Amino acid sequence: MSGQINSLKELVQTATELLFVRFKLARIEFVAQKERMVRLGILALGAIMLFFMAYISLLFGLNVVLSPQQKVWVFFGLAALLFIIMLSIFWSIAHNLAHQRRFFADTLQDLQEDVAYVQGKKTMTDWSLKE
C-alpha cells in the first residue's frame, strides 16, 4: 500500500513539475511575443514617418526637375510601385502574425499532450516526433 502511495506521490509531483515547466514556457513565449509586437510597432511607426518625409522631399525635387509630361509618368509610376510594396508588406505582416499564433498554439497543444500522458490517456507509443 505504501509503495502505491509513494508512486502516486511521485506521479503527482512529476506531473506538477511538468505542468509548471510548460506554463513557464508559455508565459515566456507570451511575454516575448508581446515585446516583439511593441518593438515592431515602434519600428513601423518610425519607418512610416521617415518614409513620408523622404517621399515628400522626393516629390518636391522631382517637381522642379521634370518636364510636365515626365511628371505624369514618374508620379503615377511611383504611386503604382509604392502600392505594390505596400501590398507585399501587408502580406509579410499577416504571414508573420500567423506564424506567431501557430507557435503559441503548438505550445498549448504540447501542454495538453503532457496532461494526457500524466492522466494515462496516452502512452509513449503515442509519442509523435515533431520536425
Image: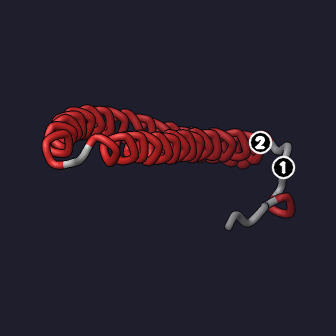
Q: What amino acid type should be assigned to the residue bearing mark 2?
A: Ala
For label 1, count other residues whose C-alpha is less than 10 Å away and answer few (under 14), some (14-19) or many (20+).
Answer: some
Residue 56, compared with residue 129, is above or below; it is above
**Whole-percent x, y for residue 5 in the image:** 70, 40
Label 2 SS: helix
Q: Quadrant of the C terminus?
A: bottom right
**Whole-percent x, y for residue 95 in the image:** 57, 46
Residue situated in front as seen by the camera: 43 or 69: 69
For label 2, count other residues whose C-alpha is less than 10 Å away and answer few (under 14), some (14-19) or many (20+).
Answer: few
Residue situated in front as seen by the camera: 91 or 1: 91
Residue at figure coordinates x 21%, y 39% from the top left: 59
Q: What amino acid type should be assigned to the residue bearing mark 1?
A: Lys
Q: Is residue 13 visible?
A: no
- Left/right placement of residue 13 relative to residue 114 reads left
Q: Quadrant of the N terminus?
A: top right
Residue at figure coordinates x 51%, y 47% from the top left: 88
Q: Quadrant of residue 112?
A: top right
Q: Are marks 2 and 1 in contact (CB under 8 Å)?
A: yes
Residue at figure coordinates x 85%, y 43% from the top left: 121
Residue at figure coordinates x 51%, y 37% from the top left: 23
- Give the CA distance from mark 2 to mark 1: 6 Å
- Left/right placement of residue 120 relative to residue 32 reads right
**Whole-percent x, y for residue 36 in the image:** 34, 41
- Left/right placement of residue 4 relative to residue 76 reads right
Residue situated in front as seen by the camera: 15 or 97: 97
Q: Would you name the residue on which mark 2 appears? A: 116
Q: Would you name the residue on which mark 1 appears? A: 122
Nearest to N terminus: mark 2 or mark 1: 2
**Whole-percent x, y for residue 72 in the image:** 37, 40
Q: Quadrant of residue 68?
A: top left
Label 1 SS: loop
